[in-house]
Amino acid sequence: MSQTSRFLVPLEGFRARLDVEEEMTANIRGAMRKRGRWRFLSWLLPHSILVVFSAVILLPLLWLLRVALTDKSTAYKIPPEWGQANFDNFIEIFTGYPFFSYFLNSATVAFGATVFALPLAVGLAYAFARYNTGGLSLRLFVLSSQMLPPVILVLPLFTLFLKASLINTLPGLILAHMTLSLPFLAWLLVAFFDGEVAILEQAARTDGATRFQALVRITLPVAAPGILAAGLLAFLLSWNEFLYALILSGPHTNTLPVGLSSFQTHRGVDIALLSAATICAILPAIVLLPFLRRYLIKGLSLGALK
Amino acid sequence: MRLLLSVLAALALAVGAAQAQTIRILMETVPDTRYIQELLPQFEEETGIDVEIEAISYIDMHSKLVPQLIAPEGSYDLIVVDFYWVGEFTKAGWLMPLDDLVERDGVDVDVYVPKLMDLVGRVDGVLYMLPFYNYSMALIYRQDLIDDADEQAAFQEAYGMELRVPQTWDEYWKQVEFFTRDTDGDGNRDFYGTVIQGQRGDCISMQWANYLYSQGGLYHDENWNPLLDTPEAIRAMEYYREAVENYSPAGSEAYCFDEAFNVMAQGRAYSFVTFNILYAGFEDPESSEVAGKVGITPNPGGGLNGGWGWAIPNSSPNKEAAWTFMKWAESAAVAKERAMLGGAPTQAQIFTDPDVMAARPYYPILGEILAGTKDFPVFTYTTEFVEQVGLELNLAATGEKPVAEAMAAAQEKLHALLVKDGKIEE
Amino acid sequence: MSVATAGGLTLAGRDRRFGLLLTAPGLLALILVITFPLFFTLFTSVHDYTLLTPNYDTFVGLENYQEALDEEYLPDSLWVTTKFVLASVVIEFIIGFAVALSLHATRRFQSIYYLILLAPLLINPVVVGLLWRMLLHSELGIVNYAIGLVGISPVSWLGDADVAFWTVVLTDIWHQVSFMAILLVAGLAALPREPYEAARMDGASTISCFIHITLPLMRPVIAVAILLRLIFAIKTFDIVFIMTKGGPGTATDLISYYIYRAAFFGLDIGRASAMAAGLLVIILALTVYLYRYMNSLK
């Protein structure tokens, strides 16, 4: 048996155990089927909660879509008049504004910050979880910067970046956003490295794997979906960040939040353009969501946030 | 990943290559900025200088500017400065005096309306800015209602006076009361005599200033002694509170100008004391139901003067090119073209230029409005003052604090800030 | 491959070394971009550092702290922030947990539910603020129109001090509850199944399963979710900046907007830093408490 497959044995055992559990759950469900009233209730209650919740989330967004298809005057008509829907606003945000560049910058920065922060955060979190490196004080230090209002952090950061010629550059913004996502990721990932994975890893170590091999071949694959999930939340953190993006960026590097904010003008809020731009900013992500969801839920479930 | 890197590299190259012959300007998002952008090709052709304009929201401008201005060399060659910040920016020494350049190139700065030159031009005799556009405040009202024969008769009967464009505050207030109505008879008023923009901070501070001037009040005397607890100031606040309670939509104590604009634009109010630049929005059918029905006139007793000026920051990497651009943008021809497109003029002759008047018939009134405006206190801590007094005004407007008490607090705040700035003794 | 001790290092020593090796790159990055601002904040807080005189020529000791404490409206802001953080985190937790449990219990339409759940997180807070300002316009908002159809009189969502506070809390919840729900549903999915099966065999009810199995097992996840949300909630800025500017009166004057004003409007970075440092101490104490509590339950 090669070394690699030996390490995989515990992992397969783990998966086998999950299958057994699946079977057992099915048995339980079978037993429950007999209790029809309970089954109906257990179907009705969650769906009722979710339907109400979804409606509360969704209705404002549908209104946003409606406003995007009309003009400001129609948007504020009460009682509502639907008017003729048109795509003028969508055309204007792409022709009259550097909207595509905002979008590309945001995607680049959020993606870059997440991709670069993840390995660093994995290192931090793994050491925290497995070896308690630095103890509580180090963990607190890592998180402490997140406890200061960004407005206080951004001035020294600006001075620092100016000296390093990082103002108005995407790498600079990526670095700035990493300082936001790194502490967040490290704290979240600690949870993924505790629990089941530790037992699997111990088994591999007993089989003769080095610490590094155990980390790379056991822990990371098992926790990988979880890491992706945490990464998604970190991505969103960066995607929505405003103050750093405002102060550290320039005409070539402005991100979506800065661009969207500029629809608040001294002659009022260009609400129809803003709505269209927001819809455009959400839509591409929605196309990706089912894919992300698979990793998110599967990820967090295996990672074991315990 | 490779895509990411190539994007980064491409952008880095673009930035690097463009730097040599490019000037960068930070502006706020207003139509005037777009007009400048429309006319840019002219300038680029004439001078060979590339211009990059970054337009961001006015509410983010100050936060964006300050770090840039503190820096020894910032990213912007030319900026626009709101009158709020004039005291602060010049006190901190962030703006470059323009007197030498004006003299060297023989630029005539007497073309500007003196009021604007005092506000966003000269500070203590030194020229730091050229006025870019003005947003002085005025009274926007429903001309169609004033012209309506039935309304005229009813008003005559109720008040024994003619219904016309209001000339005095007393007359205006009668109209405000007269037009506040319950049109559908459900017991709640749904047409309003005026609209308040009473949100804490900037919104209420700006609008209330007009109420203060209407009562003959001022913020301070010639020696900077604050006057916010005078009978005029208290009366102004009482009027404001009365409007919130009786003549303006419930909840308007939380409106900023956009919410208030929409109430008027949807045809639900008779009048609105606000920035003159909003008038164009009322005349635009895309944002307004009352296009063609509104008029604009000076606030009785005087409105608030407001404006933005061009300035070259000391941290500007390319001052000479920035000056070239400023001269072009403020040249008689370009200033006129901007006004024809709908810009808010700052040079006196533009308001009455025949071509401009043909395109924008109401511009002479804008000139008249500007001439009658009064100044907000411009000192180092204006922004802080707007916030502090804006809180006290809002507390009085919502009824949380008695009017006299709030005004006493406002007086105290202004006094403290003026002392801090060395304008007056303790 | 040997795991025996070598090179004179004990097993624990090698663990420690490996731990340090792993933390080094992350820590280096953090030290570079965090220690400096952190140090800057503390250093600035004891100097007369303003935007007009951005230098460290005048050491003022604790004067900035004293000045901040003397400010008339700071207690209001601290109280509003406390209420806001408590209300939003507690309600987000309750709703988030209900949604997480429901999602965990359903199979059908799950994709649609997840899509909707994630949507608000994709919208940036500035837009969220502007969107709700439009929806809640007291005169022209669709919300007041809709409740009018069922006979409820219009509400002054942002004009009345008590209502405005809850409007801001609810807007924040609308935006952020998904964050909590996602973390909690993940925690639920990760729970071992054996205890439930054993309990079912013993005839335990769903409610008793929830109280005796789910809650205790979920405690660590709940602690992480609440801790992170708490820290984010204390820093809430955009929603009040866009929707209320802290008003009416001081009803929604959150501390981060207060500090923002001290820094950018008051131009007094020294005083703003002193307030930020005070806030840091409070949050650190809270975190230590929560962390200890979390560990005590293990």
Image (spheres, grey):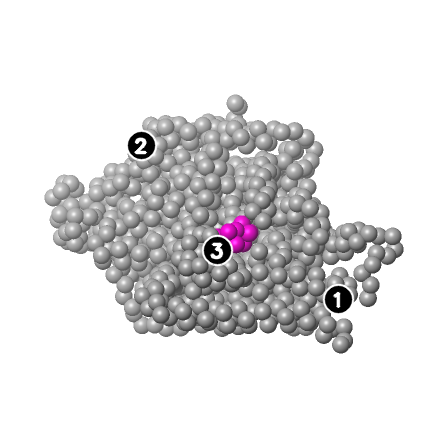
Q: Which of marks 1 and 2 is in front?
A: 1
**Disc 3 crowd, CA 10 A, few/some/many (<14, 14-19, 20+):** some
Label 1 close to label 2 by CB (< 8 Å): no
**Image quadrant assignment for residue A34:** bottom left
Q: Which of B419 and B93 is in front in this view?
A: B419
| Chain letter belonging to callout 3 | C
**Please, is residue B134 above or below residue B405 in the view?**
below
Would residue B372 be visible to someone looking at this image?
A: no
Q: Where is residue C159 in the image (x, y as percent from the top left)?
A: 34, 44
Q: Judging from the image, what secondary structure is the residue with disc 2 in? A: helix
Disc ID at residue B235: 2
Which quarter of the rendering shows the N terminus of chain C? bottom right
Question: Label 1 amino acid?
Answer: Asp
Disc ID at residue C137: none
Residue depicted at 70% across the width and 61% down the height: A202
Disc ID at residue A207: 1
Residue depicted at 48% across the width and 55% down the height: C214
Q: Real-space Cα distance between discs 3 and 1?
A: 34 Å
Q: For the magenta stretch, what is the residue range?
A: C214-225
Q: Position of residue C258 (x, y in %)?
A: 50, 40
Q: Which of marks 3 and 2 is in front?
A: 3
Q: Mark 3 points at which residue?
A: C214
